[in-house]
Amino acid sequence: MNTSLTWGLKHHQTTHASDYSVFSMKRIVDVISVAIGLVLVSPLLLISAAIILMLDGLPIFFRQHRVGLGGKTFLLYKFRTMTTLPEGLEGSFDAGNNIRVTPVGAFLRKTKLDELPQLWNVLKNDMSLVGPRPEVRKWVDAYPDRWARVLMVRPGITDPASIYYRNEEELLAQAEDPEAYYRDHVLPHKLDLYEEYVRTRTFFGDIHLIFKTILTVLLPGRYSRQDGSVSFRKMGFPSSRQLP
């Protein structure tokens, strides 16, 4: 077992007994919500898959290894939004670079419809509806001690950082070196938000985040980039206008 898995499992095993009641309640809500959600969004899933197949061809789904609860790796699913590369399964960093994004993919990303296949990850118990977004091993290894605390809970489809960084690609596109900016500025701030979520998470707080996420997708104007820039300055990071 590699070092990353060792630290993850060790911290997972030290989870307080009281947390398991929260996990159990979350799991029940996840399964019921996803079952209902799949019925409601099944037309969107079928239409999205058909359009990708007709306009962009196979594969329909994008698969990528991500690090989950206790440091264990799982396979995350999304609708494919980019032209394919052989290394895509393991993950390459394309944030801020939209050259490979297809027209269909751009729409799916904008509306977050590309995330819908992750409902399957929730059913498989790889993920929860609410929890810190899972990263590829590369970014977990960049801050292992901080991720050890974050991965004491199951990763999720949405969380406070997902709402805050809804327009992350636009932000990174303005950076001279998107990968370095993500590593040195965005990811540490995300980890701040992840750790805060882990410390303060509650059942009703998760319900609030689900509805807030829905509102963010349907009414993106409520969370403008101007608001994000102000928050960046308060956190000590450069605003989008101050990017190199």
Image (tube, rainbow, N blue to C red):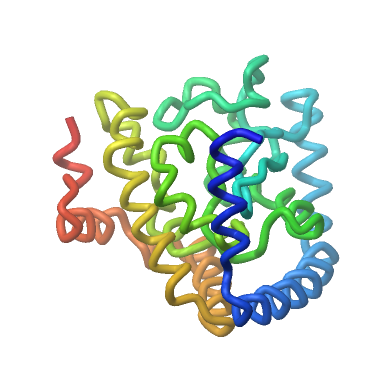
Instruction: Work out which residue is located at the far bottom of the displayed protein and give it.
Output: 204
Q: Where is the C terminus found, in terms of image quarters?
A: top left
Kindly indicate the quadrant of the structure image that contains residue 51. Answer: top right
Kindly indicate the quadrant of the structure image that contains residue 200. Answer: bottom left
Residue at 59% x, 56% y is 155
Q: Compared with residue 194, is residue 65 higher up or lower down, i.e. above or below?
A: above
Q: Compared with residue 18, is residue 171 higher up or lower down, i.e. above or below?
A: above
Does residue 98 appear to the left or right of 45 in the view shown? left
Label tally:
0
Does residue 221 appear to the left or right of 228 in the view shown? right
Percent of width and height locating residue 150: 48, 57
Please tell me which residue lies in front, 58 or 74: 74
Residue at 56% x, 43% y is 109
Does residue 113 appear to the left or right of 244 in the view shown? right
Does residue 242 appear to the left or right of 63 in the view shown? left
Q: Compared with residue 171, is residue 9 higher up or lower down, i.e. above or below?
A: below
Q: Where is the N terminus found, in terms of image quarters?
A: top right
Percent of width and height locating residue 63: 71, 34
Kindly indicate the quadrant of the structure image that contains residue 88. Answer: top right
Percent of width and height locating residue 43: 82, 56
Residue at 80% x, 46% y is 47
Please tell me which residue lies in front, 21 or 159: 21
Please tell me which residue lies in front, 109 or 126: 126
